[in-house]
């Protein structure tokens, strides 16, 4: 396989990953929107949000999107700490969650394959 | 140990990470790789594939990396095969805890696909020199 072929495969994967991230962001939003809703167990929603943010962190980082990885990590760590504390969420915790989510959403919504450090590897 | 590293079982549940990891190992590193998407699949396929090394993600649904590792150690054909964990939890004390379990080393996630093969070869060579 030539270097060009390998780069083409990387680029196809990176381009597909941009679409995957948009879907995963929607999953995170759906999960976080459930917080405080009737029938939603807060601890379960936080654990799910943590797992989803962890997933985005790992895949975006490996695919060369360092800024998205960093934003996902911030949300992941915040949700992890909330989960560990076990305390009920107050308005300030909810606001903080959505601040972290908004930063992640802002970065994913502005994504392009060329931003990946692997695009020209 | 002076055996050459040729065959790797690579276990990762995330599809995009799995694909780029496979590319990194096969096209950049020229290894022969058996890819598994879960711990259960690794337990089923690894005894037949007989790898020189197992590369195992830690955080996976179902059987996680630690449980998979322990199960592999209980299968005669796979017990003793050197194993490297791949995880975001790679602070010094965490790496030591994986080594205490019997792992050869840890590759921190996210990994760099362009240097993954080289990093694994370095760990393998270090083990060979010991």
Image (cartoon, coloured by chain):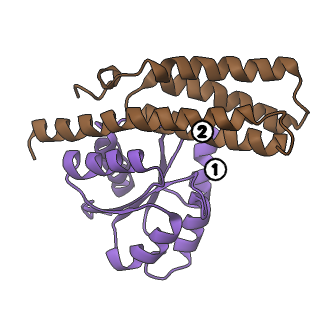
Chain colours: A brown, B purple
Between the residue at mark 2 and the residue at mark 1, the CA separation in whole angstroms equals 33 Å
Please state the horizontal and vertical placement of residue A18, each as a whole percent of the image: 39, 32
Which chain is indicated by disc 1? B
Identify the image quadrant of the N terminus of chain B.
bottom left
Find numbered disc 1 in the image and state the secondary structure of the residue it sits on: helix
Q: Which residue is mark 2?
A: A27
- Residue B61 visible, this angle: yes
Q: Secondary structure at mark 2?
A: helix
Chain that bears disc 2 = A
Q: Nearer the viewer, residue B39 or A93?
A: A93
The answer to whether residue B90 shows anywhere in this view is no
Q: Which mark is residue B97?
A: 1
At x 23%, y 28%, the residue is: A121
Q: In which quadrant will I find the C terminus of chain B?
A: bottom left
Q: Residue furthest front?
A: A38
Could you tell me residue B86's position as x and y percent? 49, 48
């Amino acid at each position: 396989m030539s270097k060009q072929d390998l780069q083409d495969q990387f680029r196809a994967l990176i381009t597909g990953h941009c679409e995957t991230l948009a879907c995963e962001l929607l999953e995170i939003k759906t999960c976080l929107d459930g917080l405080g809703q009737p029938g939603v167990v807060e601890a379960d929603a936080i654990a799910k949000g943590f797992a989803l943010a962890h997933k985005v962190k790992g895949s975006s980082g490996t695919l060369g999107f360092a800024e998205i990885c960093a934003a996902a990590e911030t949300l992941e760590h915040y949700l992890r700490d909330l989960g560990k504390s076990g305390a009920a969420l107050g308005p300030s915790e909810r606001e903080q969650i959505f601040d972290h989510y908004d930063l992640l959403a802002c970065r994913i919504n502005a994504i392009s394959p060329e931003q990946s450090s692997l695009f020209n590897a | 140990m002076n055996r050459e590293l040729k065959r790797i079982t690579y276990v990762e549940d995330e599809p995009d990470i799995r694909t780029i990891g496979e590319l990194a190992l096969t096209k950049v590193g020229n290894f022969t790789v058996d890819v598994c998407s879960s711990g259960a699949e690794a337990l089923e396929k690894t005894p037949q594939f007989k790898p020189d090394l197992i590369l195992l993600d830690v955080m996976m649904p179902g059987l996680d990396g630690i449980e998979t590792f322990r199960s592999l150690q209980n299968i005669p054909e796979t017990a003793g095969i050197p194993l490297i964990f791949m995880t975001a939890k790679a602070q010094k004390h965490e790496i030591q805890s994986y080594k205490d379990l019997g792992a050869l080393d840890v590759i921190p996630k996210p990994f760099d696909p362009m240097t993954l093969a080289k990093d694994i070869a370095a760990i393998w060579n270090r083990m060979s020199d010991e």
